[in-house]
Image (cartoon, rainbow, N blue to C red):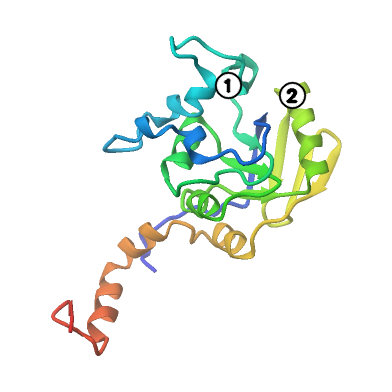
Amino acid sequence: MSDELEIPTVESVTGSGVAIRGNDIDTDQIIPARFMKVVTFDGLGEFAFFDQRFDDADNQKDHPLNEPAHQDASVMVVNANFGCGSSREHAPQALMRWGIDAFIGESFAEIFAGNCLALGMPTLEADAETVTAIQEWVEVNPDGDLEIDVAAETVTYGDTTVEVSVDDAQRKALLEGVWDTTALMKANAETVRETAEALPYVENGKRV
């Protein structure tokens, strides 16, 4: 690995939470398709959950992300099958740019969780009862911190510590700082090239 590469480890995340209730919240709800016509992901944060947050006249609706008390939240607490639907990476990109650093939920769509990992954002799972209790707590304590320990697989809030689960591959990647595969490949471009050229079915950089 390149000595110049510094992908940070993600051993823990601490911050206030925001509860987004409901099962099967898909990526089109998280970031509507009409906002995906961008060259970069910059600025996507303001469009997160746009159709749930605003009416046709752009007036605010009743939504957790519109509440002043949750504007600094960095941990999103969700229910089952969050991030289902299309595989658009814009969904976690939008939430990250809104300010989210980690997710706690009952379950996550596999591709959504993978896209979150590529951004260094843990997706931690717990049973429905545990998730509901955390959601209720963050709604009553919008300024209270959730302390996520990725290594120990625990979440602490108030005087309560609960066990959560982190996918083994995700946990390893976060703790070892190898979650940004694109950066790893760029940093090791020469090694990748040499390996490719050594393959028996590659000649002059092209498959034969």
State which quadrant residue 88 falls in.
top left
Q: Nearer the viewer, residue 127 or 168?
A: 127
Q: Is 7 drawn above or below residue 146 in the view shown?
A: below
Whether residue 28 sits left or right of residue 123 in the image: it is left
Going by the numbered disc 2, the residue's amino acid type is Glu
Apparent side of residue 20 relative to residue 173 in the rendered image (left or right): right
Determine whether the residue tagged by mark 2 lies in a helix, strand or loop.
helix
Q: Which numbered disc, 2 or 1, marks the residue closer to the eye? A: 2
Residue sitting at x 85%, y 39%: 160
Q: Position of residue 19 (x, y in %)?
A: 68, 30
Side of 140 where 109 appears, left or right: left
Q: Which residue, given by chain and number where applicable, does mark 2 sit on? A: 139
Q: Position of residue 175 (x, y in %)?
A: 59, 59
Q: Which residue is mark 1?
A: 71
In the image, 132 versus 18, the foreground residue is 132
Residue at the spot x=51%, y=59% of the render?
Answer: 177
Q: Residue furthest bottom?
A: 200
Amino acid carrying mark 1 in the image: Gln
**Other-residue count near label 1 (Cα within 10 Å), few / some / many at <14 / 14–19 / ≥20:** some
The C terminus appears in which quarter of the rendering? bottom left
- Label 1: which secondary element: loop
Mark sitting earlier along the chain (2/1): 1
Label ID, residue 201: none
Q: Quadrant of the N terminus?
A: bottom left
Where is residue 185 drawn, in percent x and y? 34, 64
Proximity of marks 2 and 1: CB atoms separated by less than 8 Å: no
Question: 10 Å neighbourhood of mark 2: few (<14), some, or many (≥20)?
Answer: some
Residues at marks 2 and 1, CA–CA distance in whole angstroms: 13 Å
Location of residue 34 (image quadrant): top left
Give the farthest residue toward the left: 204
The image shows residue 140 at horizontal and vertical percentages of 78, 22
